[in-house]
Image: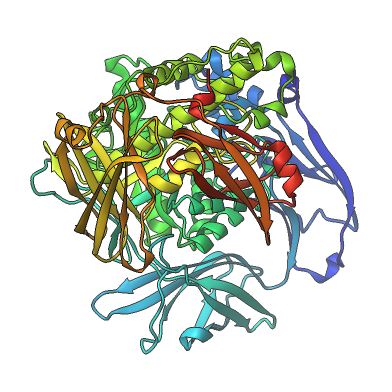
Amino acid sequence: MYRWISLDNWTYSRTFKTPFDIRKWQKMNLVFEGVDTVAQILINNVTLGRTDNMFNRYSFDVTSVIKEVNFIEVRFLSAITYAAEQNRCHKGYSIPPACPPPVQKGECHANFIRKEQCSFSWDWGPSFPTQGIWKDVRIEAYNHYHLIYFSLTSFFVKSTQKWHLEIEAIFDVVGSKPIVGLVTVNIPKLQTQQTFNVTLQPGEGSIVLLVNINKSFAVEAWWPNGHGKQTGYNMTTTFIMEAGYQIEKFSKAYFRTVELVQEPIHGSPGLSFYFKINDRPIFIKGSNWIPADSFQDRVTYDTLWLLLKSAADANMNALRVWGGGVYEQDEFYDICDEIGIMVWQDFMFACALYPTDQNYLESVRAEVTHQVRRLKSHPSIILWSGNNENEAAIASNWFSIPYADREVYIKDYVMLYVKNIREIVVAEDKSRPFVASSPTNGLESVKEGWVSQNPYDTHYGDTHFYDYSIDCWNWAAYPKTRFASEYGFQSWPSFSTIKKVSSAEDWSYISNFSLHRQHHENGNDQMLQQIGYHFKLPQSTDPIKKFKDTIYLTQVMQAQCVKTETEFYRFSQSEIIKGEGHTMGALYWQLNDIWQAPSWASLEYGGKWKLLHYFAQNFFAPLLPVAYEDKGVLYIYGVSDLHVDHKLTLRVVVYTWSSLEPVCTLSKGGVTVKAQSAVPIYKEFINDFLERCQNCTRKSCVVTFCLVGEDGLQSPTNHHFLSSLKDAVGLEKTQLSASVSQQDDIYIFVLQTTAIVPFVSLDVGSIKGRFSENGFLMTEKKKVVMFYPWEPTSVEELEESLTLTSLVDVV
């Protein structure tokens, strides 16, 4: 109903008084931090220039046109009209894809406009191609000189064991003469102070200063979440120039190194693909980030903090900022710096081929230069990546390009990502690695001319993996890859989230609403199919109960699927089997949602945790036992991200579904779990195992296990199902109850049960907050769960809103 908005052209205008005496200033600029997207800018009816790139910063000299009272206009052209027109003008050959699949209900030719690609629709989001001023706009007035960009990057010199800081400052110098002066850099905590003589040339230019850090001080490095502190040092940089006035710049200096290691592996063809931070190999745990809203001005600091803190709270140490969205706002990266979330930063190109005509390339060059200068000071960013899936699109021929025409597109690909984007990144930022695409074969792709035969090859680089027809509990279906940078399964968001944007007639899995919000072909059916492998589908005659049960089961299914797959990637980190393994990263698709709809996300629109996010807290835990079966044998691995080896006890407890009393327990002491690795710590034939635990069959029993050490060191309790739960014998309807009390700012839920219950879900509707755990297997009579509110609430409110659901409630 609102599609007409994006098809119209809109003009933003206003009158403003200049808040300073214009006669006192040599130069005045009108600066737009972000214009979305195609516009003509006028002041007092004089055209200053045009914009065509949402990701660029535009500065217009208004010295000669500004008055005391001014009329400013930004005349936008519909992004849809512009994209179609650009496509029409591209005469020689087509640049696919023309349009998104019909199920996405989107707009065409997104690849012809430098705008958030998913704003023309995606398989998890709507089409709202906005027009407007999406970032700050201001007037700058200055004499003599002006600082435009200021960045700092750290380097560690191994030979001298010393840290250096490289400061780059980009200035605009007014007038025709060079300006000389002094720059003083001061880092009090490191007793480091240095002064430099500098000369600034007329026009726009840069100076680079190398600061040597006082060696007598132990510099605390910046570490990812779970591996150390995120120490930053306050730093003041003062520019005192002959022209009289000084600029003082306050910033934080962080010290960390990053290396992307691609080396031969003993016993395996191909190359490794893993990150070293401060010379320590780090297993990357996390997810993929998409824009947090279709309307970026709604994305506040609080929105970002809640989502990113939820990532850190689930033991994540990394997020990939995906290439179909936006380069995130400064606060996003500030928070990542602060809480230790590493960022894999894509450039904004996704799932498409792109033009390479001169105007387009010039616009992209400006965009990349601006973004690298803006972002390179952040220690959280560990990698630049050229695009999302575009190497794969050519290699796997997604767009059915005739073989004879392939070279044209490969040439364009290399022109855009290698000869332009990579060239700028390498010139602007020598402190972190660059890959041209994801998935890619890394150095092997480079060797093959940047487009490899099979970018999904498990022996090189990273992989993306999606297959909805497999049984997701079967670990053997997953690629034993070097690095899993995308994988996942869909689920529906909670009823409370859907309720806000729907009415009663929509509350069914097959309503028009449910189909309308599902933008992935056959997505709703695929979820039911996957649920059907292991669970009974809801049969309730009450339509709303049936809908709620189905939502619950999609979340259980998604959580269990992603758990199985992630645990597989984690236990593959230290082994090579049939030439495959040494997996060093697991980033599931996707962290967050752009609206209220079925998607791959673990956090709903608004920040509510799905069951998957609670599971992530466990499957990304720093210490975790993981079980899997192979050829009738049960294996348990000890997976550790800890920096030292630990001697632990493995406790295995087996229950029948019908009783809270364990049938058998096993304690295996003296188990060594090695630092930052995954090692087998237990194996037994399932048949022997069942025999030992009398009365147990695959269908009647469930296995739980955890690792316990000295000093309170303990892993989460994990479990392994011996059969599908739809075949489980002895699972009974239980009396499940909860009482709520308050302690300071936290609420305490005490749960009681009369029998074992799988997938216990606590839901308090639209009350904002999260539980300490959720979706768990309850194996004791009484369990205490904490609720951390994000806004004021009360015991009464929580009691009233609470819904308890478990697998046995679904009928």
Percent x, y of residue 672: 20, 59
Q: Nearer the viewer, residue 497 or 539?
A: 539
Q: Residue at x 50, y 22 (%)?
A: 90
Q: Is residue 201 visible?
A: yes
The answer to which image quadrant residue 761 occupies is: top right
Percent x, y of residue 313: 50, 53
Q: With respect to residue 761, does 276 lie above or below?
A: below
Q: Residue at x 57, y 78 (%)?
A: 237
Q: Nearer the viewer, residue 197 or 573?
A: 573
Dividing the image into 4 quarters, which one contains the N terminus? top right
Percent x, y of residue 666: 24, 48
Q: With respect to residue 59, does 81 lie above or below?
A: above
Left or right, residue 793 beside residue 808? right
Q: Is residue 414 visible?
A: no
Q: Residue at x 45, y 20 (%)?
A: 96
Q: With respect to residue 242, does 489 lie above or below?
A: above
Q: How many marks?
A: 0
Percent x, y of residue 52: 62, 37
Q: Nearer the viewer, residue 469 or 364?
A: 469
Give the colour scheme of this rendering: rainbow
Q: Nearer the viewer, residue 445 or 228?
A: 228
Left or right, residue 15 beside residue 172? right
Q: With respect to residue 414, does 670 lie above or below?
A: below
